[in-house]
Amino acid sequence: MTRNRPVLIVEDNPDDEALTLRAFGKKGVTNPLVVAHDGVEALDYLFATGSHAGRNPSELPAVVLLDLKLPRMDGLEVLRRIRADERTALLPVVVLTTSREDLDVRQAYRIGANSYIRKPVDYERFLQAVDLIGQYWLTLNETVDAQVGSAY
């Protein structure tokens, strides 16, 4: 069940991080919110390595909200590595970014993004977007056990 599983937010901008956390709180999302500040930290969390070595790697997040423009490893490379590993191949990944580049949208979907959302600049529209993300990915969407591996 996705209601108790965390949401992994991969975001390097402190203002966008605070806005996202505030929006989830304001919309009543009760899932734990985990923030990774770059692509390497996101993969460390998912695969229980580095600073997250003590975490149970079988406890995956309900959804990953992935920015594209990240330090150390960009979001597209993070997405490639998520899709390449049997443990995370089916993990829902929503690209949540300011990028308006058509190439980013195309690449994200080719690599396996489940959704691509441009961050609204307006606070009220951002709240609405987070509310819809929460409703869909944490309440309505049916998931498979990502640990089973790819069923393509």
Image (cartoon, rainbow, N blue to C red):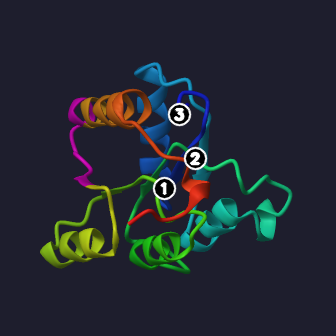
Question: Quick one: label 1 or label 3, which is nearer the N terminus?
Answer: 3
Question: Quick one: label 3 or label 2, which is nearer the N terminus?
Answer: 3
Which residue occupies the foreground of this view, 124 or 91?
Answer: 91
Q: Nearer the viewer, mark 2 or mark 1?
A: 1
Q: Distance between the residues labelled 1 and 3?
A: 12 Å
Residue 38, position as x, y percentages in the image: 56, 68
| Location of mark 1 (residue) | 91
- In magenta stretch: residue 115: no
Crowd class of label 3 (few under 14; some 14 to 19; many from 20; radius 10 Å): some
Q: Which amino acid type is marked by label 3?
A: Thr
Disc 1 is placed on an element classified as: loop
**Image quadrant occupied by the C terminus:** bottom left
Residue range of the region highlighted in magenta in the rendering:
116-125
Left or right placement of residue 12 versus residue 33 in this view: left
- Residue located at (51% from left, 69% from top): 82
Q: How far apart are marks 3 and 2 (CA)?
A: 8 Å
Disc 3 is placed on an element classified as: loop
Q: Distance between the residues labelled 2 and 1?
A: 8 Å
Tell me: residue 128, above or below residue 88. Answer: above
Tell me: residue 111, above or below residue 140. Answer: below
Tell me: residue 64, above or below residue 130. Answer: below
| Location of mark 2 (residue) | 61
- Residue located at (53% from left, 33% from top): 2
Quarter of the figure with residue 151: bottom left
Q: Which amino acid type is marked by label 1?
A: Leu
| Location of mark 3 (residue) | 2
Looking at the image, the residue that sits furthest to the left is 102
Q: Which amino acid type is marked by label 2?
A: Pro
- In magenta stretch: residue 118: yes
Which residue occupies the foreground of this view, 97 or 133?
Answer: 133
Residue 36 visible in rendering: no
Residue 148, position as x, y percentages in the image: 58, 57
